[in-house]
Amino acid sequence: MAVALAAMVFPGMKSLGQEGTPAPSPAHKTAKLIYHPPILADRSLGQRMGGGARGAGGTDASLLTLVPEHVALTTREQPSLFWFQSKPATAKLELTLIEPGKPKPLLALGSPADKPGIHRIRLSNHGVKLALDVPYKWTVSLVPDPANRSLDVVASGMVKRIEPTKELAQELAAASVADRPAIYAQAGIWYDALEAISDEIDQKPGDPSLQEERADLLKQVGLPAMENH
């Protein structure tokens, strides 16, 4: 089912923060990222599932999808999906994106799982577009033995695309790039807030304040501290 890809995992995906380390930018001062879950957040479908160590022939690495425990939102047709892998694994990594009511995955990818840390995949690199108001389930799995899937380490999350309100669109249009993560977080748009702050980290990997902001954002939805390699 999954497609074998290059060793740098999926096109458009990388361990974040691995570039060079230019001097931090002392001028980085923005609004604090405070995530406000949507008032009508759907928790019936959105239980975050994290995969822990299996052992006994499996892998001792763990996975976490970087999502809250409800159906998290995006305003983007092709958002990024983020997850964390605790340590290198000899297992295969699989990612699937499933539309409700359809047995065939909208996206199914496979890759080596030898790089720990925070990872992302950009749906734009795979021609995948999300329809409005559809709750999609996405899953990452470590597969140590394809003949025995009971050994898999699995983590999953939910994503739903919505149309931004007129007020949000106007606020974003007038905002600086540095202020957009906080605006998205305040509006309850999880995926866009995480993507915006991660894009800033990619641009300024030597700025520890950006790493701290992302870590605090993840902590707000019950995700543990995680070391990015």
Image (tube, rainbow, N blue to C red):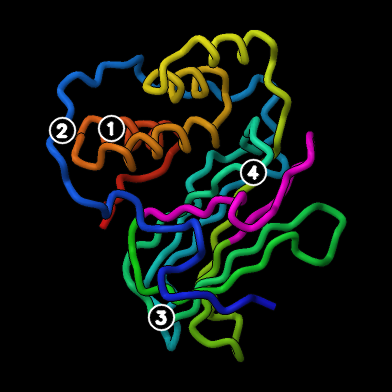
Decide which of 122, 153 is in the foreground and name it: 122
The residue where tag 3 is placed is 55
Residue 210 - label: 1
Q: Does label 2 or label 4 sit earlier along the sequence?
A: 2
Q: Does label 1 or label 2 sit earlier along the sequence?
A: 2
Q: Position of residue 128 (x, y in %)?
A: 70, 53
Above or below for 70 versus 92: above
User: SS class of the residue under badge 4?
Assistant: loop
Q: Name the residue located 47 percent from the left edge and 53 percent from the top edge.
A: 120
Q: Which of marks 1 and 2 is in front?
A: 2
Decide which of 146, 124 is in the foreground and name it: 124
The quarter holding residue 98 reads bottom right
The residue where tag 4 is placed is 78
Distance, label 2 to label 4, CA atoms, is: 30 Å
Asked if disc 1 and disc 2 are in contact, CB closer than 8 Å, the reply is no
Q: Nearer the viewer, mark 3 or mark 2?
A: 2
The residue where tag 2 is placed is 24
Above or below for 69 versus 54: above
User: SS class of the residue under badge 2?
Assistant: loop
Q: What stretch is highlighted in magenta?
A: 118-139
Query: As shown in the figure, which amino acid type bears the numbered disc 1?
Result: Leu
Distance, label 3 to label 2, CA atoms, is: 41 Å
Above or below for 78 versus 19: above
Query: As shown in the figure, which amino acid type bears the numbered disc 2?
Result: Pro
Decide which of 168, 127 is in the foreground and name it: 127
Q: Name the residue located 15 percent from the left edge and 33 percent from the top edge.
A: 24
Which quarter of the rendering shows the N terminus?
Answer: bottom right
Query: Is residue 120 highlighted in magenta?
Result: yes
Distance, label 3 to label 4, CA atoms, is: 36 Å
